[in-house]
Image (cartoon, rainbow, N blue to C red):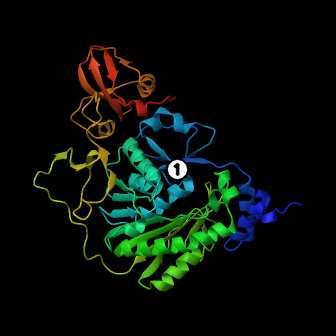
Amino acid sequence: MNNVTKSETPIGKISLLIDQVKEYCTEKQVELFCQGAIQKPVGGLIRNTKYKIPFEESAIQDEKDPLLFRFDKEDRFGKYVEHFMGAYYMLDPSSASISYFLKDLLPPHFICMDLCSAPGGKSISLAMRRDDGIFLCNDISFSRANEIGKNAQRLGLDNLLTMSLDSQKIELPGLFDLVLLDTPCSGSGMFRKEPKMLEDYSIEKMMRLLPLQESLLEKAYDLTASGGYLCYSTCSLSVQEDEAQIDKFLKKHPDMFEIKVDKFDTMVEGEYGYHFLPGIFSGEGIYFCLLRKKGTKKRNFTPLIEKKETRVDGRRVFQIKKGTYLVREMFQEWKDLPFLAPGLKYLDDSPYQKCKYDHAASKLLSSVPKLPVTREQAISYASGNEVILKEKQDGLIILTYQGVPLGFGKAVQNRVKNYLPKGLREMVI
């Protein structure tokens, strides 16, 4: 006898998700969601504002958000040389849109804590929009936190500092202008993008996660400065993980209040916060709510003062056990944190170094001569080949394509020896 219940089958689980969106959608919106549920997901990317280069025509710019582009998933944007060199970051349009609403709220030179950051999309997309911010990105998973650092190195972001701690052990109370909490959730909003999420989804899983979400919200509250902002988000469709959590939180903290946004017509407004839903918005299922703490910030982080402070191109040189980094700024309260990557790696500390600088430093250094190359040469460089020049040149150089740094090489006569680390080489198009 088959003991599998309807709710355990893929069709049954889709029915559960439809029941969830009915709690905050109109009949027409539910109908659109049902249509979207059987459509394939769309790809998204955020343009790196450090560089301005043309994209493939198949990437369509969003009507409202000039940094957001969509593309067909069958188009291999992750394999283009532009992705290799950091001209854009691939991110679901719904996730990318949260930073669109944050960018105009924050004060100049804001400082952000991203509690459950990996692989870093929320902070990265906001950093693209607000270069003046500094982001402390944390994730309890060491391997996933490392991915944040890798993304920051590729994109040339010297204002992202990464670490891997249990969020409850971060003791920096009341100091952050913004706390991002993309909390662990049931993942029901990703059912199109990740089929395994639908297989893994259950009401029991959702219920198990509610206490964790509640405790993380409390930690986020503790870290938020007086007058600061808290952004709570999930990739869940359920009211229990979304509006209900915010309702409980606001009742517990009367000094917090919701910030309304000038929403898109393609967003669904809940009792608190907003939903991006497939079929209504061109992206996956994401919920977010913006909150603010009453009052005025009385104190901020204290810039670290060292007797032998060194700066390169305006960035602070900061040393940890794992190497030497270039970072926008370092603070007294942060100096002893167990960083994985505080900014961009500066020096190559490998045992058989060819170049004294780490590959990531090519994104920033102004002292090394730049050598423009063709697209064909850029593709060849990315795979680890020498680059042949028409004219003779000698010495350490940074190869660039359309103004974007590719990496280091050593010019000898009309050849450029490739200094791209083997672990970063890839076949691109």
Residue 378: percent from left, percent from top: 42, 26
Residue 33: percent from left, percent from top: 71, 61
Q: Residues within 10 Å of mark 1 (few under 14, many from 20)?
A: many
Nearer to us in this view, 230 or 404: 230
Looking at the image, residue 69 lies above or below residue 405: below
Q: Quick check: 259 left or right of 312?
A: right
Which amino acid does the dot numbered 1 rest on?
Leu
Nearer to us in this view, 109 or 215: 215
Q: Secondary structure at mark 1?
A: loop
Q: Residue at x 39, y 32 (%)?
A: 402
Q: Which residue matches tag 1?
A: 91
- Assign the N terminus to one quadrant of the image: bottom right
Residue 404 occupies which quadrant of the picture? top left
Q: Quick check: 243 left or right of 25?
A: left
Q: Residue at x 24, y 55 (%)?
A: 329
On the question of residue 269 being in view, the answer is: no
Q: Quick check: 193 left or right of 114?
A: right
